[in-house]
Image (cartoon, grey):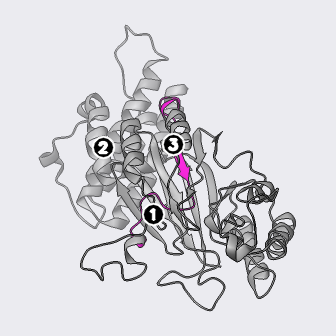
Amino acid sequence: MRGRTAGNRSAALSQSLASWVCTKGSIALAWAAISALALSWTAANAASTATMDARLPLKPGPSRDTGHKDLLDSFLTCGKFRIEPMRLKLSRRSLVKTGAALGAASLAPFGLSQIIVPKRRVLRIGHITDVHIQPQGVARSRFRDCLRKIQEVNQVDLILNTGDSIMDSYSANEARTRDQWNSWREVVSTTVTAPMWSAIGNHDIWGWDKSGSGTTGNEPLWGKKWALQELGLPAPYYTQDINGWRVIALDSTSIRQGTSYHGRLDDAQFNWFSQVVRTTPPGMPILVMSHIPILAVSAFLDGNNESSGDWRVPAAWMHIDARRMKDLFHQSGQVKLCLSGHMHLRDQSDYNRTHYVCSGAVSGNWWGNGSYGETPPGYSVVDLYADGSYGWEYHTY
């Protein structure tokens, strides 16, 4: 009974495949489908043989073979094309003996192996960045619309926020900074139901411009402390494992002389980062999130960076220590994806098997009308798969 059930099921499946191939009308697809027929015959006869005495010869019965014979006839005369049986010289016995090898050789080039064994998605992420929320204008209502679409339409499992959550506290006084964080808290607490993990952006840092902010540097929440409190972060940088992936959040903004900053990990953070990457369990893929891009095409094209006759990319726009970071990634082989924002421009690049995605800003042209450059206001949806691959789409709202 087991042999007959397996045969009937495979025959029914193969009949459907024959119909599809005839519709498409491709010799290549026919050859792949015949290979699938060989595999189904192999499976059916293996199931049948398991129930028989090994000393008895295998005797084909009509219940196992009739459907497959009809299928082969369908392939040979389906109307879109015709294959001469004598030219193929295919017999049931030869198909059964060579089914597995033929299937492996013929199905893969046509992409059918991906249909038979689909990738397994383990996590869907909504990536937001550069919200730049403020009390006035459309910022709060538009941010709420964005969050609702991410959760209700895209149905994400996790939201990653790569910074610049508020309009600016770098040069803002205490009252202005408080109003912005109050706006952030009000929208997030009433709209977000999915887990949200965040990184700190340069505009989230309070008072590094002491002159503009009127700070002394001795205030309890000065610098990154206020952002850590509002975003609920344990530290400026951290790591968390989820569904077979390791997520590493970096603090990519370092102060320079005076009031300026650049994209760089200080030595303490880089040593920690190197240790986390190198001690990741073998086979576990890594996603790195940062506010400032580690590598980005858009950093070259935002402004007249070639006006001197040479490309000059500011260190505040892309990590100045990208070289040692890409060396770490290359040695590891497990850092698959780096997500960032900061540029308000979307781009995607691939270097040494690590993919770099810079997403457009939720605020677009900082809540003005229209796009920033060629990039409209939006967010990204990132699908992570068990094999370490990913999918990325940019959405408007």
Q: Which mark is residue 318?
A: 1
Where is residue 309? Give x, y as percent.
Answer: 24, 79
Crowdedness near tag 3: few (<14), some (14–19) or many (≥20) residues, C-alpha within 10 Å: few
Write the residue at 74% across / 45% down: 234
Answer with the quarter of the image where residue 196 lies. bottom right
Regarding residue 171, the answer to whether it shows in the image is no
Q: Tell me whether the residue at label 2 lies in contact with that at label 1, contact meaning CB atoms closer than 8 angstroms.
A: no
Determine which residue is flagged by label 3: 267
Left or right, residue 9 beside residue 143: left
Residue 289 lies in magenta, yes or no?
yes
The segment highlighted magenta reads: 278-298
Q: Nearer the viewer, residue 118 or 216?
A: 216
Amino acid type shown at disc 1 = Met
Amino acid type shown at disc 3 = Asp
Answer with the quarter of the image where residue 344 lies. bottom right
Image vertical order of residue 79 relative to residue 114, above or below: below
Regarding residue 316, the answer to whether it shows in the image is yes
Amino acid type shown at disc 2 = Ser
Disc 3 versus disc 1: nearer the observer: 3
Disc 3 versus disc 2: nearer the observer: 3
Where is residue 99? Give x, y as percent.
Answer: 30, 34
Q: CA distance from mark 3 to mark 2?
A: 57 Å
Q: Which mark is residue 35?
A: 2
Q: Nearer the viewer, residue 102 or 165?
A: 165
- The secondary structure type at the circle numbered 2 is helix
Dominant secondary structure of the residues highlighted in magenta in the image: loop
Crowdedness near tag 1: few (<14), some (14–19) or many (≥20) residues, C-alpha within 10 Å: many
In the rendered image, the quadrant that contains the C terminus is bottom right
